[in-house]
Image (spheres, rainbow, N blue to C red):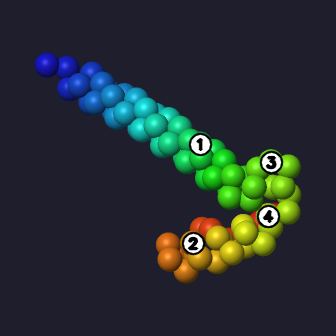
Amino acid sequence: MNYYNEIKETLIKNEIYKKVKDYSKNKSDLNTYFEVGRLIVEAQGGEERAKYGNKLIKEYSEKLTKELGKGYTVSL
């Protein structure tokens, strides 16, 4: 048995696994944020009215921060 090759292959498999996991997480994040954006536009009455929805975004931001914690502050 060549221990060096076994160690190397184990490390390579781990790196591949991490890349696949990162890709899956990024894809999930992208889909989540797209859906959140779509729902916000819909809640504001559609794309034509979306620019008037800053109050709604601020309200949702405050509620989400209170209920889910940090990471939902408004940055316009």
Instruction: Residue 30: give its label.
Output: 1
Secondary structure beneath disc 4?
Answer: loop
Q: Which quadrant of the view contains residue 5?
A: top left
Report which residue position mark 2 lands on.
64
* Camera-side mark, 4 or 1: 4
Residue 4 seen anywhere in this rendered image of the structure? no
**Along the polypeptide, which appears first: circle 4 or circle 1?**
1
Density class for disc 2 (Cα within 10 Å; few <14, some 14-19, many ≥20) is some
Q: Position of residue 68 (x, y in %)?
A: 50, 72
Report which residue position mark 3 lands on.
47
How far apart are the two marked residues, 1 and 3, measured between alpha carbons? Answer: 20 Å
**Along the polypeptide, which appears first: circle 1 or circle 3?**
1
How far apart are the two marked residues, 4 and 3, measured between alpha carbons? Answer: 10 Å
Instruction: Residue 51: give its label.
Output: none
Density class for disc 4 (Cα within 10 Å; few <14, some 14-19, many ≥20) is some
Write the residue at 72% across / 53% down. 41
How far apart are the two marked residues, 4 and 1, measured between alpha carbons? Answer: 22 Å
* Camera-side mark, 2 or 4: 4
Q: Position of residue 15 (x, y in %)?
A: 40, 33
Instruction: Indicate the amino acid at tag 4.
Output: Gly
Write the residue at 30% across / 25% down. 9
Instruction: Indicate the amino acid at tag 2.
Output: Leu
Left or right of 4, for residue 19: right
**Along the polypeptide, which appears first: circle 1 or circle 2?**
1
Write the residue at 50% across / 35% down. 23
Report which residue position mark 4 lands on.
53
Instruction: Indicate the amino acid at tag 1.
Output: Leu
